[in-house]
Image (cartoon, rainbow, N blue to C red):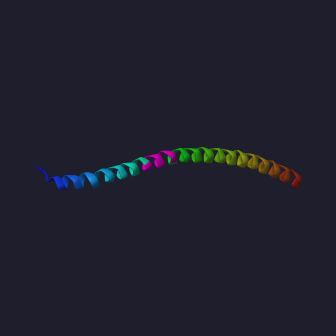
Amino acid sequence: MMDPGVLVILLLFGTPLVLIVGAFVIIGLIIMKSGSKKGTALSADEARIMQELHQGLSKLEKRIENLETIFIEQKQ
């Protein structure tokens, strides 16, 4: 059987320690969960920007081809 003094010390220091560690775990999970939402929002925003860049570059490519055609026709 445990000595009553050891039991009192464990209860006095162990209970707050368990509560503090549990609080850190819960806060960490909340931060990770909120961070994952921001990560998906950023990746969705990045995907939209990449699509806009691709569309812009496709239009630029068509314009360059048209200018090349015009330039070649003027040379002849």
- Is residue 28 one of those drawn in magenta? yes
Give the left or right position of residue 35, taking residue 49 as reference. left
- Residue 35 location, x and y as percent? 51, 48
**Could you tell me what secondary structure mostly forms the magenta stretch?**
helix
Residue in the foreground of this view, choosing between 73 and 23:
23
Residue at (46, 48) in percent of width and height: 32
- Residue 9 location, x and y as percent? 23, 56
The mark tally for this picture is 0
Residue at (19, 52) in percent of width and height: 7
Query: Which segment is the magenta one?
Result: 27-34
Residue in the foreground of this view, choosing between 76 and 26:
26
- Residue 53 location, x and y as percent? 69, 48
Give the left or right position of residue 27, taking residue 18 as reference. right
Q: Residue furthest left?
A: 1
- Residue 62 location, x and y as percent? 76, 46
Residue at (80, 52) in percent of width and height: 68
- Is residue 24 one of those drawn in magenta? no
